[in-house]
Amino acid sequence: MVTSPTASRRPSWAGRNYTLLTAAAIITNLGGHGALIAAAFAVLDAGGDGGDVGLVAAARTLPLVLFLLIGGAVADRLPRHHVMVAANALNFVSQAVFAAVVLAGDPQLWQMMLLTALGGTGQAFFGPASEGMLLSSVSGEQAGRAFALYRMAMQGAGLGGAALGGLMVAVIGPGWVLAVDAVAFAAAGALRAFLDVGHIPRRAPGGGLVADLRDGWQEFIGRPWLWSIVAQFSVVVAVVGAAESVFGPLVAEDELGGAGPWGLALGAFGAGTVGGALLMMRWKPRRLLLAGTLCVFPLAAPSAALAVPLPVAGLAAVMFVSGVAIEVFGVSWMTAMHQEIPEEKLSRVAAYDWFGSVAMVPLATALAGPAEQTFGRSTSLWGCAVLVLVVTAAVLLVPDVRNLTRRTKGVVAAHANGAADAAEDPEGAAPDGVSLEKPSA
């Protein structure tokens, strides 16, 4: 057999599925990060205020919370790439209509809320399927490096998307940015249609959706490191999300000069995540979750910087550092999940992870406007920073968080057993050379 030069230069773990997943994630992140800025400024351009921006953001995350658990069970039941493609199709339609409404002029608040809610519904089914697909597409000692490279590519695309999106909103308006995001969803969905799930063992018949959810819950609640960090992030994601999706554009509009500077700050965060991913391609902390959790503390800094507020250069520097820190956590978290969770339960456990992480986001974003009116913008942002520090300190009290260690040989053995099981299945297929998609999202 002749090996092509391209294949010979590619790492052994970077197989077909991994390459397709990475390419599709780059495309959606290029469009999606600009679209987040565009949605906020579409509301402001239509005459909305901070409360309206919060309502639109909440409309995106509410269906995400409602349908995530069902999405996880469906993704462990059906071919994961089919679920991903269907979700991308829904996101394409919702963003295309959102763009048309904005470009037509005078978009109504209820229209923007409905269309972002459809996008959130698509994400609820896409997220667990995507994470399960990625975690099942990499194996062996290089899993952490694979996750770091994937996240670096994804975050690098987010960096470009945020910077370009902020510039495009300022120059041509939010409607065209939303249209670009719709095209990105269509292109990414086309790539994901070619994913191969033949290496994933077929599930034995029996049981229903409720049984699947119950089984996933038992797997989730039986691991203290898992549920405690998800509980921590239910607060962290909510307050950071409110700060960045509601208060950030308002501070940018009133103090920093509009969408362009805010896009630059988000771009600096993206640059930090790329730097963090580069770091994690070389650094393999033995205590995975201890290293990751310590790096959550810097996530309080952007809220504090907006509360001051710092000038654009200072805000960008703070966002860069927090980007590096969250990427250390992200790679460590994915490696722990890959190491500890059985393959056939990955999407269901990922769904409980996502559910806990975003459950409070609709409430936080909806309350951001009233909190600003009641306590003031600066006080509300300082409150966000304090909450991040408190819950992160609390989770370090859990012994499993401090002590869970990297088990390279155990991971290799576990995946070898999984491959053997797949080979014994007469209807299954051997892995395709790679023993394998949260925000993430």
Image: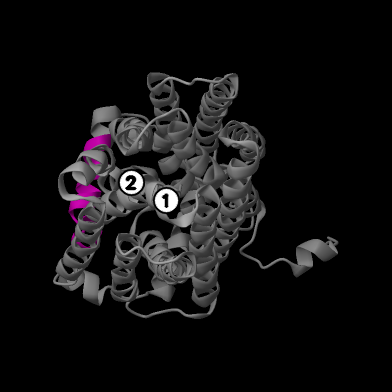
Q: Residues within 10 Å of mark 1 (few under 14, many from 20)?
A: some
Mark before the other along the chain sequence, 1 or 2: 2
Q: Is residue 40 above or below residue 278?
A: above
Q: Is residue 218 located in the magenta-colored stretch of the structure? A: yes
Q: Is residue 78 above or below residue 344?
A: above
Residue at 46% from the left image edge and 47% from the top image edge: 441
Q: Which residues are magenta?
A: 213-227
Q: Secondary structure at mark 1?
A: loop
The image's colouring method is: one colour
Q: Nearer the viewer, residue 49 or 352?
A: 49
Q: Secondary structure at mark 2?
A: helix
Residue at 37% from the left image edge and 63% from the top image edge: 333
Residue picked out by circle 1: 438
Q: Residues within 10 Å of mark 2 (few under 14, many from 20)?
A: many
Can I make out residue 25 in this image?
no
Q: Main secondary structure of the magenta part?
A: helix
Number of numbered tags placed on the structure image: 2
Q: Where is residue 152 drawn, in percent x and y? A: 56, 63
Q: Nearer the viewer, residue 367 or 325?
A: 367
Is 134 on the left-hand or right-hand side of 249? Answer: right
Residue at 48% from the left image edge and 66% from the top image edge: 316
Q: Is residue 347 above or below residue 299?
A: above
Is 205 on the left-hand or right-hand side of 13? Answer: left
Residue picked out by circle 2: 354
Amino acid found under the numbered disc labelled 2: Trp
- Whether label 1 touches label 2, CB < 8 Å: yes
Amino acid found under the numbered disc labelled 1: Lys
